[in-house]
Image: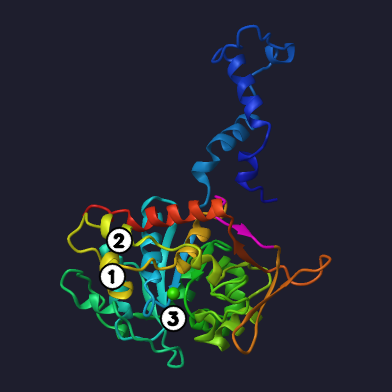
């Protein structure tokens, strides 16, 4: 039987056992006026099995599996993808996750070049990059991808033709990982996710290798002055998102970050001006200014999905009850909660209290502005 190490780490008996063990070995004195109970005085050196369990208990955080992240982005129109990718690199630098690769879900001739430039900027010049080969996926102009042509951001992948096909790359990366170990973060249209499911054995591959899908898409609360917001990642490719919602395997959880979450997390413009001056050319700063200008606090839609994917246990967000997302033909995402224990429990969406909102925004800011490693 597989016993998760975290169970051992959180076992409530660990602290008293450690205290008794220390007392028995003379490593810790009983507090003044606190008589040592007989059963403690009689405590003997634990058996090898108990010692092994103790070792696992105290060391398990060191062995805990860090999330293996695959970042799927439509890095073209909006700039939150650039900030989200910066976060992925920072989190990998901190050892909080392993960043396996980046795939792009929209068409623009500069996507591979820009992603490689940003990966190189963050110290990962050889991180695998894939781009969609689906001509039906949205073509999108960009205000900032031209930074890829700047001599300030050297890199070697210059053309989309030289990048791998996104679906091929995802399949290759998934196949190389242990079962149920990869968290996919998808923060754009769902062309790559849908085409992955439709590829030969795609559903089975996802079922076997993917631990969770953290997706920025849809709307699940009143936002943008309506309770029927049609969110861009859905309406720019409704068929793709319907494929994901309908065919993603039931066994692999999906956590949706709706429009309302990012809308409530405005990235402070002052941070862009004030905190990224440690390099004369900063790709995140320049991309932000080209897209949003200096007078706008861009909502952190995509960043929210990264934060949840790497730190699901840190209470930056709450989770809805389980249920199932249905993508309607007009692009609205309808959440159908499980009723009386019946129905699909695959999906949940993020929620956020005011305290979580402050904490999440602070974390996003710090993870975005951390300097890349020294060369
Ligand atoms: Ca995006």
Q: Position of residue 255 (x, y in %)?
A: 60, 66
Q: Secondary structure at mark 1?
A: helix
> Magenta region, mostly helix, strand or loop?
loop
Q: Which residue is mark 1?
A: 289
State left or right for residue 241 relative to residue 71: right
Is the residue marked by circle 2 packed among few (<14), some (14-19), or many (20+) residues within 10 Å? many
Magenta stretch contains residue 135? no
Image quadrant of residue 227?
bottom right
Residue 92 visible in rendering? no
Which residue lies at the image location 60% right of the left edge and 15% below the top edge? Answer: 23
Q: Nearer the viewer, mark 1 or mark 3?
A: 1
Find ligand 1 in the image and state its quadrant.
Answer: bottom left
Label 1 close to label 2 by CB (< 8 Å): yes
Left or right for 187, reference 156: right
* x, y percent for residue 59: 53, 37
Q: CA distance from mark 1 to mark 3?
A: 23 Å
In the structure shown, which secondary structural element does the residue marked by tag 2 occupy? helix
Q: Position of residue 41 (x, y in %)?
A: 68, 11
The residue that mark 2 highlights is 272
Q: Secondary structure at mark 3?
A: loop
Precedes in sequence: disc 1 or disc 2: 2
Q: Which mark is residue 105?
A: 3
3D distance between C-alphas at marks 1 and 2: 8 Å
Which label's residue is closer to the chain start, 1 or 3? 3
In which quadrant will I find the C terminus?
bottom left
In the image, 231 versus 67, the foreground residue is: 231
Magenta residues (range) = 314-320
Q: Nearer the viewer, mark 2 or mark 3?
A: 2
């Amino acid at each position: 039987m597989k016993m998760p190490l975290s169970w051992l780490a959180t076992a409530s008996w660990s602290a008293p056992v450690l205290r008794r063990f220390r007392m028995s070995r003379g490593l810790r004195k009983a507090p003044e006026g606190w008589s040592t109970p007989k059963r403690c005085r009689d405590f003997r050196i634990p058996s090898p099995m108990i010692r092994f369990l103790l070792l696992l208990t105290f060391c398990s955080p060191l062995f805990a599996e860090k999330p293996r992240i695959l970042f799927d982005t439509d890095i073209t129109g909006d700039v939150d993808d650039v900030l989200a990718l910066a976060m992925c690199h920072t989190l990998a630098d901190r050892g909080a996750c392993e960043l396996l690769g980046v795939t792009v879900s929209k068409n623009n001739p500069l996507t591979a070049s820009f992603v490689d430039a940003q990966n190189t900027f963050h110290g990962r010049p050889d991180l695998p990059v894939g781009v969609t080969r689906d001509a039906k996926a949205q073509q999108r102009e960009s205000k900032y991808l031209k930074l890829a042509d700047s001599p300030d951001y050297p890199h070697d992948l210059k053309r989309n033709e030289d990048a791998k096909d996104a679906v091929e790359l995802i399949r290759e990366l998934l196949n190389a990982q242990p079962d149920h170990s990869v968290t996919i973060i998808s923060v754009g249209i769902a062309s790559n996710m849908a085409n992955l499911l439709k590829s030969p054995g795609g559903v089975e591959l996802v079922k076997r290798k993917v631990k969770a899908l953290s997706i920025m898409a849809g709307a699940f609360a009143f936002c943008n002055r309506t309770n029927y917001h049609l969110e861009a990642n859905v309406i720019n490719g409704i068929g793709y998102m319907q494929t994901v919602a309908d065919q993603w395997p039931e066994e692999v959880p999906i956590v949706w970050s709706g429009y309302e979450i990012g809308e409530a997390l405005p990235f402070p413009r002052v941070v862009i001006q004030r905190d990224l001056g440690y390099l004369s050319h900063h790709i995140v700063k320049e991309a932000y200014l080209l897209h949003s200008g200096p007078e706008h606090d861009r909502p952190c839609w995509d960043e929210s999905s990264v934060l949840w994917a790497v730190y699901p246990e840190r209470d930056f967000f709450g989770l809805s009850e389980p249920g199932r997302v249905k993508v309607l033909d007009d692009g609205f995402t309808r959440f159908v909660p499980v009723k009386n224990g019946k129905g699909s429990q695959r999906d949940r969406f993020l929620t956020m209290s005011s305290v979580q909102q402050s904490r999440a925004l602070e974390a996003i800011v710090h993870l975005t502005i951390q300097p890349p490693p020294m060369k």
